[in-house]
Image: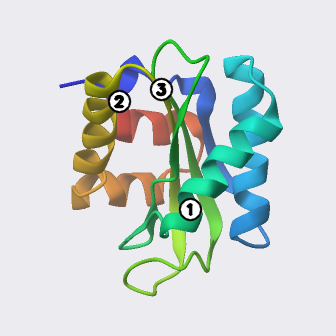
Amino acid sequence: MAAIADFLSSGNVLAKVVAADKDSLLRALCQRAAGSVALPEASIAREILKREALGSTGVGGGIALPHARMAGIARPFGLLAQLKKAIAFDAVDGRPVDIVFLLLLPAEREEESRNALASVARKLRDPAVVGAIRAGRDDASIYGAIAE
């Protein structure tokens, strides 16, 4: 199973993010990701929003896992945002979201992509991990909570 640290660097953890709504948050995260993966922001946003249109990636419990398969990405890439204030996300349980893990996956490496998504989902089902992310005061403490 993939370790979160294999595709999430400490530089891609954002504490106390302020977002007006789901769309503006996703676009801001796509913009941030574009700089790290050397792909156009517009193509990342298009794929993330296309996946979101199939059904919300708000998985419940205040957590969202927006993800997309991207041509031009050699390995999974993660970006974790802890929101200062929860926002509506059309989550399956109807609750607002305050933890968002954006995951960009290689289009052609299906098993690796599945493993990365499963690793994130499993970590974010652990109440101790989620509590530590929510309690995190800065990027480093949040990274430590999810990457250990």
What element does badge 1 sit on?
helix
- Asked if the residue at tag 1 contacts the one at tag 3, i.e. Cβ–Cβ closer than 8 Å, the answer is no
Give the percent coordinates (x, y) of residue 20.
79, 72
Q: Circle 1 sits on which residue?
A: 52
Give the percent coordinates (x, y) of residue 51.
54, 55
Indicate the amino acid at tag 3: Ala
What element does badge 2 sit on?
helix
Indicate the amino acid at tag 2: Ser
Q: Nearer the viewer, mark 2 or mark 3?
A: 3
Q: Circle 2 sits on which residue?
A: 113
Q: Residue at x 46, y 77 (%)?
A: 91
Q: Earlier in the sequence, mark 1 or mark 2?
A: 1
Indicate the amino acid at tag 1: Glu
Q: Quadrant of the C terminus?
A: top left
- For disc 1, the neighbor class at 10 Å (few under 14, some 14 to 19, many from 20) is some
Q: Circle 3 sits on which residue?
A: 107
Q: Earlier in the sequence, mark 2 or mark 3?
A: 3
Q: Residue at x 51, y 12 (%)?
A: 74
- For disc 2, the neighbor class at 10 Å (few under 14, some 14 to 19, many from 20) is many
Q: Residue at x 48, y 69 (%)?
A: 55
Q: Nearer the viewer, mark 3 or mark 1?
A: 3
Q: Disc 1 and disc 2: Cα gap in Å?
A: 17 Å
Q: Disc 2 and disc 3: Cα gap in Å?
A: 8 Å
Give the percent coordinates (x, y) of residue 123.
26, 46
What element does badge 3 sit on?
loop
Q: Disc 3 and disc 1: Cα gap in Å?
A: 17 Å
Q: How many marks?
A: 3
Q: Nearer the viewer, residue 117 or 69?
A: 69
Q: Pick out the residue farthest to the left.
A: 1
- For disc 3, the neighbor class at 10 Å (few under 14, some 14 to 19, many from 20) is some
